[in-house]
C-alpha cells in the first residue's frame, strides 16, 4: 500500500447553475484571465479538482462543471461524446469565455477529445488525463488479458444490469474503484467517497459507457487532426503511455507524459505534479 501526506484542499467556491437549452448544469467559476475548463470523469464530480482548482485561479479563470447526468447537473438527452461536447460548446458560449484551455480526466477526456475534433475554434489547448479515448486506443487495451483494467466498459454498457446489481451497494461498488484503481491509497478519503456516492445516486453515469461505441465511431468519422497544442498525461499504474499513443493518431502537436507513482485518479493522487504539468503547458501555449 502506498500512502502520502497531502495538504488539505481548499474549498471550492459556491456552485452556480446555468440553463443550457433546458438543461441545468452545476459548475464552479472563479478567477480572472484566460479560461480553463476542467471536466471530471466517472464516477466522480467536479469535486475531483479540489486540490488544483484554487491554485489555478491565482492566474486564470477556472470553470469546473459536473458532467450531465452526474452530481448536481441534469441528465442529458444524449451521451455520445460529440453530443456532450456540443453541449459544452454552448455552455462556454453562454458564459462568454472565448477560447479555453480544455482539461479532461477519464470520461472528461473523452468529451475533451470530441470537443477538439468538432469545436477546435473554441480551444487554446487540449489536455487529456488517463483515459481510454473512444476510437483511438490500441486494440490490445481491450484484450481479455487486460480485463482487470477494462471490464467495466462492458458491464456498464449493458442496459439496466449495473443499476440492478449496484442498487443499495453504491458505496461498496464505488469504493472498489477508488481502492483498486488508485496507487496512492489515501488520496480519496472516506469523506471524499461519501461526496462521490451522493453525486452518483439516481444519476446517469453509466450512459456514457452505453454510448462508447457511438462515440468511437463519431470520433473516427471526423477524419481530421487537431492543431491546438495537446498534452496527454498517463499514470504509471493505469493507462500509462496508452493515452499518448492514442492522441498521436489525431495530432502532431503533442506532448505526452507518464506520471510515476500514480494510479488512475491523477488529480487526487498526484495533484501537485499535475498542477505543474498544466501550468507549464499553458505557459508554452500562450507565454
Image (cartoon, rainbow, N blue to C red):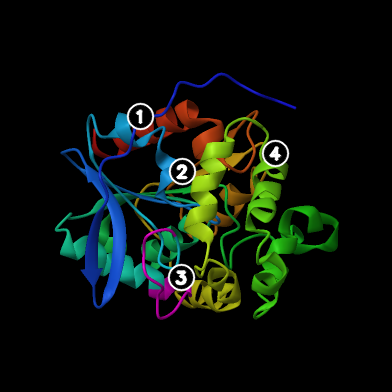
Q: Is residue 156 visible?
A: yes
As drawn, 259 above or below 249: above
User: What is the CA distance from the residue labelled 2 to the residue labelled 3?
Assistant: 20 Å
Quarter that holds the C terminus:
top left
Mark yes or no: residue 129 visible. no
Real-space Cα distance between discs 3 and 1? 31 Å
On the image, the x and y values in percent for residue 133 come to 56, 60
Front position among marks 4 and 1: 1
In primary-sequence order, the first of circles 2 and 4 is 2
**Magenta segment boundaries in residue numbering:** 71-83
**Mark 1 nearby-residue class (10 Å; few <14, some 14–19, many ≥20):** few
The residue positioned 24% from the left and 38% from the top of the image is: 286
Does residue 129 show up magenta in the picture?
no
Instruction: Give the number of the mark in front: 2 or 3.
Output: 2
Camera-side residue of 22 and 277: 22
26 relative to 183 in the view: left or right: left
Badge 2, how many Cα within 10 Å: few under 14, some, many 20+?
many
Which is closer to the viewer, label 3 or label 1?
1
Q: Circle 4 — which element?
A: loop
Kindly indicate whether the residue at mark 1 contacts the one at mark 3 (C-beta within 8 angstroms).
no
Q: CA distance from mark 2 to mark 1?
A: 12 Å
Q: Main secondary structure of the magenta part?
A: loop
Mark 3 Cα shell of 10 Å, populated few (<14), some (14-19), many (≥20): many
Which residue is identified by label 2? 48
**Residue where numbered disc 4 is placed:** 237
What numbered label is drawn on residue 10? 1
Mark 4 and mark 1: Cα distance apart in space: 27 Å
Q: Is residue 120 left or right of residue 176?
A: left
Q: Which mark is residue 81?
A: 3
The image quarter in which residue 144 lies:
bottom right
Amino acid at each position: 500500500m502506498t500512502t502520502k501526506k497531502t495538504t488539505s484542499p481548499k474549498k471550492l467556491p459556491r456552485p452556480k447553475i446555468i440553463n443550457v437549452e433546458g438543461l441545468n448544469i452545476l459548475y464552479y467559476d472563479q478567477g480572472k484571465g484566460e479560461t480553463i475548463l476542467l471536466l471530471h470523469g466517472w464516477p466522480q464530480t467536479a469535486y475531483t479538482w479540489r486540490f488544483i482548482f484554487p491554485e489555478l485561479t491565482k492566474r486564470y479563470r477556472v470553470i469546473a462543471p459536473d458532467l450531465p447526468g452526474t452530481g448536481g447537473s441534469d441528465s442529458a438527452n444524449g451521451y455520445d461524446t460529440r453530443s456532450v461536447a456540443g453541449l459544452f460548446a454552448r455552455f462556454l458560449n453562454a458564459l462568454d469565455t472565448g477560447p479555453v484551455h480544455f482539461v479532461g480526466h477519464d470520461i472528461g477526456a473523452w468529451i475533451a477529445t470530441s470537443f477538439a475534433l468538432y469545436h477546435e475554434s473554441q480551444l487554446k489547448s487540449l489536455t487529456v488525463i488517463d483515459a481510454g479515448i473512444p476510437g483511438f486506443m490500441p486494440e490490445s487495451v481491450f484484450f481479455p488479458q487486460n480485463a482487470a483494467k477494462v471490464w467495466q466498459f462492458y458491464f456498464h454498457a449493458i442496459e439496466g444490469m449495473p443499476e440492478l446489481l449496484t442498487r443499495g451497494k453504491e458505496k461498496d461498488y464505488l469504493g472498489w474503484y477508488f481502492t483498486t484503481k488508485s496507487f496512492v491509497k489515501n488520496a480519496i478519503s472516506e469523506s471524499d467517497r461519501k461526496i462521490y456516492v451522493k453525486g452518483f445516486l439516481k444519476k446517469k453515469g453509466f450512459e456514457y459507457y452505453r454510448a462508447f461505441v457511438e462515440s468511437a465511431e463519431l470520433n473516427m468519422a471526423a477524419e481530421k487532426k487537431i492543431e491546438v497544442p495537446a498534452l496527454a498525461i498517463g499514470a504509471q499504474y493505469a493507462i500509462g503511455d496508452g493515452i499518448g499513443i492514442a492522441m498521436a493518431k489525431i495530432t502532431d502537436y503533442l506532448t505526452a507524459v507518464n506520471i510515476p507513482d500514480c494510479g488512475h485518479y491523477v488529480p487526487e493522487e498526484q495533484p501537485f505534479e499535475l498542477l505543474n504539468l498544466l501550468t507549464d503547458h499553458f505557459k508554452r501555449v500562450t507565454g
